[in-house]
Amino acid sequence: MAIAEKRHIGADLVWLGVRRNSAVGVAIIPSNKRFRAIVDTKALADGVSGTVSELERLNGLLEHIRPILFLQRDTMHHFYSAMREGGSSSRPPLGPGDNIVITPELQSKASEWVATLASRSAALYADTFYERAKTPGTTNFALYSDAAKEASNEDVGLGGYFHSYWWSVSLRDAGLLELDVPIPCLEMLAAAVNLLVAAPFVRGCSTALYTDSLTTADFLQRNSAHSSLM
């Protein structure tokens, strides 16, 4: 069976940064855009400050997504005042390289965005006749992991990928190559780390985990393994 990304109902196309399927009449936010928005809004919700330039890019992305999900203007409240002195809209603007002002109000709005993006990914064309979209879209994230253990390969290690984000760990740098850990265990470790890395962003979403290790897949489904190391 094809991977989730290839399962379509009829033909679709990407126009103005939005996937549009005329067969079923739906507009879909591309997964990489939605995921990037979740990552950045969650950072704000957690109180992680960034520069004015970074927030400007995030605001542009959210303004692009907002009408697709029929969100009102109030969802962007406090995202612009954070780029002014003291976090007040009546104060002078900060410079592009200055740190933004994190306020409880901004964190609250960012948390609302995280919850919305984690549960809604599309809207029906028919919803354009209503003030708000009534039915949330289906969110489906895909996580990919792999492990390589070849003595002649300089790139031996673990890695993971999900919607334009990736991570990697060198077995040599981590001191695992000398331990001679079996490759099935490394595949399982890669899948586990991939889940830990992506968990803050895909929690509560429908998520598919992809691995080329049958042992790992069996272990995750059965929650049991013959190997004590696994």
Image (cartoon, rainbow, N blue to C red):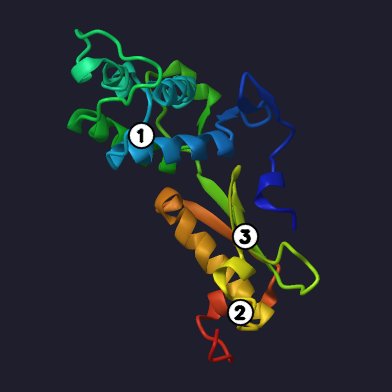
The residue labelled by disc 3 is 159
Residue type of the residue flagged with mark 2: Cys
The residue labelled by disc 1 is 113
Quick one: 18 or 80, which is closer to the camera? 80
Q: Residue 152 lies in what quarter of the image?
A: bottom right
Crowd tier of the residue under label 2, counting other residues whose Cα lies within 10 Å: few below 14, some 14–19, many 20 or above: some
**Can you see residue 7?**
no
The residue labelled by disc 2 is 185
Across and down, in percent, residue 177 comes to 64, 76
**Residue 103 vertical position relative to residue 151 in the rendered view, above or below:** above
Quick one: 219 or 70, which is closer to the camera? 219
Disc 1 from disc 3: Cα separation: 29 Å
State which tag comes first along the sequence, 1 or 3.
Answer: 1
Q: Extreme right residue here?
A: 152
Residue type of the residue flagged with mark 3: Gly
| Element assignment for label 2 | helix
**Residue 199 vertical position relative to residue 8 in the rendered view, above or below:** below
Across and down, in percent, residue 163 comes to 59, 44
